[in-house]
Image: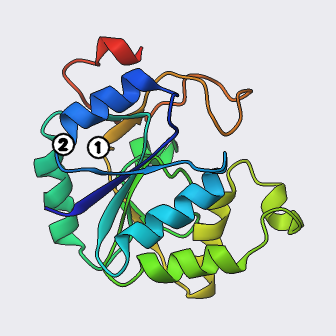
Amino acid sequence: MTRRIVRAVRGKRLECIAYLQNNLVGAEWCFDQINSGWDTMIRAFEMAGGSAAVHFEDDAVLCDWFSEKLEAAITERPNTIIQFFSMRPEDLTVGSRWDDQFMNCQCFYVPAGLNGPLAEYMRSADPVNDKRIAKCKDPSDWAIRQWMRDRRMRYWIHVPNLVDHAVTVSLINPKRARARQSLTFQQAYAPSQLQ
């Protein structure tokens, strides 16, 4: 089973955390330490070290048969960054595809050997004084996208999406819409405690 690392904030989204603790057996937890999603993302990459890992935000909702579908998708592309959450119209019209505009860190896979370099790249950046980072809605998205661009890498968007976003207030920006949903997520029932 591929390592699973969940980024979370202690004392927040307790229902979401309980849901993932019950449904992501063996997951490792990377809790925010300094009220910084940037720092938490770096530490999650560092936790993974040289191994492959699937990274989650704590408000992810899993599809039915999640583990089986996840491992099957990774087996098809073990050396590719794979995104399992998207909200783009092309998800409906094109389906699974290559892309080079990484966004949405809800749930994504990073192959072995790439977590460390991503952590190093983010550690070397200056999210406070770099205007390119400061203007981003989510600077971690920017960092991953820029790191991939520098290496002329593309990533795979998996459709249908294997996770959705719980309907909840964003901890990065409370002004964001509470409902930021996948267009292709499939689940027989939604966990009531996350609505």
Which residue corresponds to the image point at 65% horizontal and 75% vertical from the top-left? 123
Q: Which mark is residue 162?
A: 1
Q: Earlier in the sequence, mark 1 or mark 2?
A: 2
At which x and y percent is residue 76?
Answer: 18, 70
Which residue corresponds to the image point at 25% horizontal and 50% vertical from the top-left? 27
| Mark 2 surroundings: few (<14), some (14-19) or many (≥20) residues within 10 A | some
At which x and y percent is residue 24?
Answer: 22, 42
Marks 1 and 2 in Cβ contact (< 8 Å): yes
154 vs 74, left or right, is right
Residue 70 visible? The answer is yes
The foreground one among 94 and 159 is: 159
43 vs 71, left or right, is right
Residue 102 visible? The answer is no
| Mark 1 surroundings: few (<14), some (14-19) or many (≥20) residues within 10 A | many
Which residue corresponds to the image point at 17% horizontal and 33% vertical from the top-left? 64
Quadrant containing the C terminus in the rendered view? top left
Residue pointed to by mark 2: 66
